[in-house]
Every structure is written in C-alpha cells, then in structure tokens.
Amino acid sequence: MRIAGIYSFNNGVKTVESKYPELLKEVRHCIQTVNASLCKTKKSEEKTMPGEILYSPVDLNSEFKKIFFQHGWRSIRVRCEYPTQFYVAEYSPVKLRGGAFREMDFIKEKLGVEVQFGKYSFMVYNVAAKMTIFRNLSFIDTGIEIVPVKALADGMSTGVSYYEQFLWDLEHRGVSNIDIPVMIIGVDA
C-alpha cells in the first residue's frame, strides 16, 4: 500500500514527528509492506456491483496486524466494568456474557495506531473517544489513524468511509480540550 495523504488533528503530525520519529518510519514501512492485491478477495453480493471482486476489510486488517506484530507492536485490550448504579429502581439489567472490552489495534511506547476500513462512525470513535480513553488509562499519549482514501474505498463494499470524508468532519468538528494529537494517514492500494 502507499500513503496518499497525511492530516494533522490537534497538532498530530508535529507531535508524532518530534516524539516518535523512529516509530513513524516503522509505521510507514508497515503500510508500504501491505500487499493490498492479496486482499482483493471479497465477492460482492451488492446490487450495484454483483460478482465484482472487492478489497476485503477483514483481510486488509489481518495483513496490517501480521506486519505490525512482526515489528513488535502489540494490541491492548481493556476489560470494561460497566456501572450499574444508574439504572432506575424498577429495572433489572441482564448480566453481560463474555464481558465487554475496548481494544487498541497497535501500541508501542506511548504511540497508539488504529487501522480502520469500516464505517464512518468507527473512524470518528477512534479519534474522538477511544484514543482519549487509552490516553486516560496511560497506555498512549499520541495516535495515528490509518484509513482508506476514496479511491480505495471505491474498491470496497458500499458504506466504507474514507479519508476525505473523515477530514471534512474533523475540520468542521474542531478540536476539544480532551482530544489527543493524532496523525491521520490516508492509504491507497
């Protein structure tokens, strides 16, 4: 894969380049090592493109995971203990089976990386909520979000969000005092 765009959210580019220059080189290398053509495995069942072979988000994520793990990055999974004191007295909550958790795709030192080839809401959640949560839990202080550009998203199932749309929303949302610095990297095959 190749890097097609870089966006700085809350001074993310400058922060990553100054605090984590070696890890940024590693992230760039990992992106460039992913062979997207191996991930063009999903046969479309959609009305607008029946039978077309598309990029599989699951396969792309697996490739990223394999490569990042080979370079010593690790996932962090945090168990969620949900509060129960806010239910109304007449309500009896159902006990959750298996437990809930939040997970960061890759962490090394205090740099967190998320790879997102899914719906738009997940991109926003990663940057505006998950990365702040993992900072508050002292796992990261800076983030990188890797997302497809429109050209790559067009080769995937409908509904996959993309870099250009994501940036427009971040620009119009603005930065909050709880947001961490995040470098957004748009990738193409």
Image (tube, helix red, strand yellow):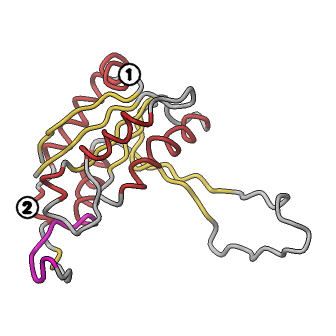
Q: Residue at x 22, y 50 (%)?
A: 148
Residue hosting label 1: 11
Residue 109, which numbered label?
none
Magenta residues (range): 48-58
Residue 163, horizontal then vertical, whole percent: 25, 45
Disc 1 residue type?
Answer: Asn
Queried whether the magenta region covers residue 49, the answer comes back as yes
Residue hosting label 2: 37
Q: Nearer the viewer, residue 14 or 66?
A: 14
Question: Which is nearer the N-term, disc 2 or disc 1?
Answer: 1
Q: Nearer the viewer, residue 59 or 5?
A: 5
Please tell me whether mark 2 sits on a helix, a strand or a loop.
helix
Q: Residue at x 53, y 53 (%)?
A: 77
Q: Give the side of residue 164 with respect to residue 169, left or right.
A: left
Secondary structure mostly taken by the magenta-highlighted segment of the chain: loop
Q: Give the side of residue 30 with respect to residue 104, left or right.
A: left
Image position of 129 with respect to 35: above or below: above
Q: Residue at x 42, y 55 (%)?
A: 121
Disc 2 residue type?
Answer: Ser
Residue 106, horizontal then vertical, whole percent: 39, 45
Residue 187, horizontal then vertical, whole percent: 18, 45
